Amino acid sequence: MARKSRPTGDPKMSMSRRTFLSAPAALAATGLMPGPLLAAVAAETPGMPDLSSWEAVRAQFALDPSLLHFASFYIASHPAPVREAIEGYRRAMDRNPFHVVEHGMFGDDAQNLPLQVQREAAAYLGGNPEEVCLTGNTTTGLALVYQGLPLERGDEVLTTVHDHYSHHESIRLATERAGASMRKIALFDDSASAGTDAIIERLLEAIGPRTRVVGLTWVHSSTGIRLPIREISAALRRRGGRPLLLVVDGVHGLGSVDETIATMGCDYFCAGTHKWMFAPRGTGLVWASAENWARLRPIIPSFTDLGQYEAWLEDREPSTPTNANRMSPGGFHAYEHQWAMAAAFRMHQRIGRDRVAARIAALNTQCKAGLAQNPKVKLHTPASADLSAGLVVFEVEGVAPASVVEQLLAKGIIASTSPYAVTYARLAPSLVNTPEQVDQAVRAVREISG
Ligand SMILES: Cc1ncc(COP(=O)(O)O)c(C=O)c1O
């Protein structure tokens, strides 16, 4: 466990991280002083490869080439820069786990590896490093936020019928504990023809006197629709009255849409980074402003908030407000995965958030246009790229979704079904696919539909 070298919760991160207590000579002898640690990992890890063409990007993945992978949004295949970063940290930790973790976790700013991750993530999100809470996945982020909210008996969380199990259950468990309630509404009857104004109208109409929190999903894995979160947030703020908190499950938008997430209008943005971001499996984040972090009550002891640790040492309550680090679940983790998140954010930045989004939009538009030619296919995802992202959700007349997926697999195409009460088939064209592969998938669906 750390000494007084724990990272601070100071919002400005003007560190009071203190120097490690061991004698410098002893550390130097390990060859793993933090500077050297980072330098050693960097020296063993090739720099960012050429990512200027889509072929070069696709070459970073070790995916089975005998299959067409249209379910990459489910869980990431680690691209080479991420694999190499994981390997670099793993080798360093296997050589000297104590010093690497002691420095990497509890060292000053220059050595602190979660801070490096927070910086890379913040640059991508358009926020500040101290606003980024590192988690293990979307589910954990949602649970931390809802359990952390100061819900009172009688309060209501308004959500929708369209959200994922992890989101609904996070709300149910938190409201049950607080004596609050949850209510689900439909934002549209038909996802494919839903429009921004009608969605906003339904949401505003449903807000009741007890509603304190609104929980939404950015890109729905049930139908592929992408909610206009920016416009929804603006409408919620315009309506006046007691301000509501907007919690967003953003997992299928992060890494697929060109958005500056910190300015999108979410109060809490929760996402796994092990899907579209291609960060290591078992990684995720929550973004919120300092003001919104301060509203929450942590439920898991943090290992990255000095204020909380110092308070414990002095046997008192923490005197500073809750911050992102205090909300980040402590205990030791698979650090090679968490630290290698930074490589995934760097890779996205290197390719360009706008180029990534444009490529995903083009492949998905092509896929939808191809399927739309098929009279036996009903698309549930809006045709508009503004109201969709990387998921194409559809039904084939007379063929059960599970059978569509099975028959596609028999043709070497990996698709998936949506894990909801009403289930559909899904193709998710992403950076690992080519336009030719999209045509192949569309042709395969035509063969299945007969
Ligand atoms: C909309 C949505 N939210 C949350 C999750 C759960 O994500 P995680 O595995 O990061 O907890 C999923 C899973 O794919 C999802 O589709």
Image: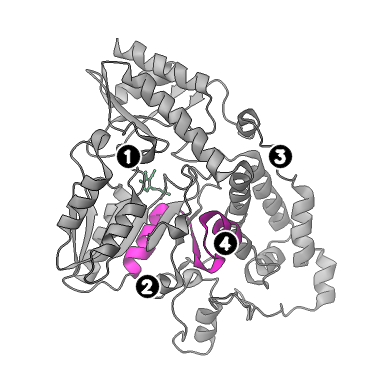
- For marks 4 and 2, give the CA distance: 20 Å
Type of amino acid at the residue the image marks with label 2:
Leu
Under tag 2, what secondary structure? loop
In the picture of the structure, the residue carrying the numbered disc 1 is 225
How far across and down, in percent of the image, does residue 416 sit? 37, 30
Q: Which mark is residue 296?
A: 2
How far across and down, in percent of the image, does residue 230 sit? 36, 54
Under tag 1, what secondary structure? loop
In this rendering, the answer to whether 143 lies above or below 345 is below
Type of amino acid at the residue the image marks with label 3:
Pro
Type of amino acid at the residue the image marks with label 4:
Gln
Under tag 3, what secondary structure? loop
How far across and down, in percent of the image, does residue 285 sit? 48, 57
Q: Quadrant of the C terminus?
A: top left
Image marks 1 and 2: residues in contact by CB distance under 8 Å: no
Q: Which mark is residue 49?
A: 3
> Which of the two discs, 1 and 2, sits closer to the camera?
1
Point out the stretch of residues depicted in magenta: 119-148
Under tag 4, what secondary structure? helix
- For marks 1 and 4, give the CA distance: 29 Å
The main secondary structure of the magenta stretch is helix
Q: Is residue 354 visible?
A: yes
Tell which circle, 3 or 1, labels the residue nearer the N-terminal end: 3
Tell which circle, 4 or 2, labels the residue nearer the N-terminal end: 4
User: Which of the 4 image quarters holds residue 333?
Assistant: bottom right
Note whether ligand 1 is within 8 Å of mark 3: no
In the picture of the structure, the residue carrying the numbered disc 4 is 118
